[in-house]
């Protein structure tokens, strides 16, 4: 069997085999291995503590909720905010501030700039793994809310919760690159997110809030108008997040500034 045969059969592929020439099972295995390794780097071996914090918050909400009378328990809009949006927002900040900070702590940031190939691919792989991880966590939280709290829509609620988390994550990445400090970026993003969350209560009957709740009861608003607001809000936040994404990647061009 020659080397060309090795390249075209995923089960016998060599380490230098291009990804496009692998079989689909081999591609899936390779993608899973990359995602698993990137997730380990993102958590920086603190996976247990991250999951413990989220689990403790969910258990706390569950106990408090079911100690209330039936009519006073959390409704769908409250569950969406407390069970999905809030934990995802916190995790988005914590995980995003780890990317630059952990590389600087381990003194491996220089390696990211000197690795063969485009450094943008390396950072996009890291950022993409982060957001895929947030999306999977959104689905898990959505399932937990559905089975233990209320009849909240499956998967669509996860998508609605992921979009603000994506925005918060890219904002943290942007500040991490600009300020050269994950801690400072996390503090600024947490402060801005808290202010935006407070304003979302005042602007609950409008589309102009990052934490737009599609399951809230809108006063004196036609359902069709509310749906239009929802799409306008989600598209706008996604575009804003992509702009911060682009700004973070462009900021990575300033190698000397980041390595100081």
Image (tube, helix red, strand yellow):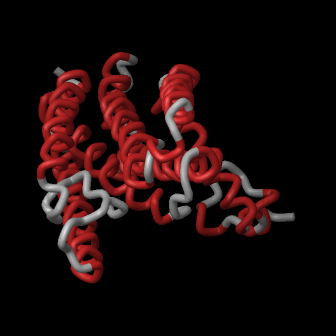
Q: Quadrant where the N terminus lies?
A: bottom right
Q: Is residue 52 left or right of residue 168?
A: right
Q: Position of residue 174 (x, y in %)?
A: 19, 42
Q: Nearer the viewer, residue 26 or 169?
A: 169
Q: Is residue 117 visible?
A: no
Q: Nearer the viewer, residue 83 or 13?
A: 83
Q: Position of residue 229 (x, y in %)?
A: 21, 72
Q: Which residue lies at the image location 51% right of the left edge and 59% below the top edge?
A: 152
Q: Which residue lies at the image location 29% right of the left edge and 76% below the top edge?
A: 227
Q: Which residue lies at the image location 19% right of the left edge and 35% below the top edge?
A: 194
Q: Which residue lies at the image location 18% right of the left edge and 72% below the top edge?
A: 220
Above or below, 124 against 154 in this view is above
Above or below, 35 against 3 in this view is above
Q: Is residue 59 visible?
A: yes
Q: Position of residue 131 (x, y in %)?
A: 42, 49
Q: Quadrant where the C terminus lies?
A: top left
Q: Residue furthest bottom?
A: 224
Q: Is residue 52 left or right of residue 126?
A: right
Q: How many marks?
A: 0
Q: Within the image, what quadrant is residue 34 found in?
A: top right
Q: Is residue 188 left or right of residue 183?
A: left
Q: Nearer the viewer, residue 245 or 137?
A: 137
């Amino acid at each position: 069997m020659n080397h060309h045969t090795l390249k075209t059969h995923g089960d016998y592929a060599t380490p230098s085999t291009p990804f496009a020439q692998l079989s689909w099972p081999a591609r899936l295995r390779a993608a899973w291995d990359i995602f698993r390794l990137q997730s380990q780097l993102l958590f920086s071996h603190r996976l247990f503590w991250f999951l413990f914090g989220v689990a403790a918050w969910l258990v706390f909400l569950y106990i408090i909720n079911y100690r209330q009378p039936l009519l006073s328990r959390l409704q769908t809009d409250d569950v969406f905010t407390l069970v999905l949006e809030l934990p995802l927002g916190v995790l988005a900040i914590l995980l995003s501030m780890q990317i630059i900070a952990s590389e600087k702590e381990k003194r491996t940031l220089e390696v990211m700039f000197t690795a063969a190939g485009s450094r943008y691919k390396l950072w996009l792989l890291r950022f993409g793994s982060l957001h895929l991880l947030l999306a999977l966590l959104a689905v898990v939280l959505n399932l937990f809310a559905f089975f233990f709290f209320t009849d909240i829509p499956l998967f669509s609620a996860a998508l609605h919760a992921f979009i603000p988390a994506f925005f918060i994550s890219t904002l943290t990445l942007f500040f991490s690159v600009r300020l050269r400090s994950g801690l400072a970026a996390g503090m600024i993003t947490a402060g801005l997110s808290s202010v935006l969350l407070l304003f979302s209560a005042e602007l609950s009957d409008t589309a102009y809030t990052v934490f737009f709740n599609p399951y809230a009861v809108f006063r004196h608003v036609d359902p069709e108008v509310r749906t239009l607001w929802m799409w306008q809000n989600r598209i706008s936040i996604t575009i804003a997040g992509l702009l911060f994404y682009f700004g973070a990647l462009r900021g990575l061009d300033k190698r000397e500034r980041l390595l100081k």
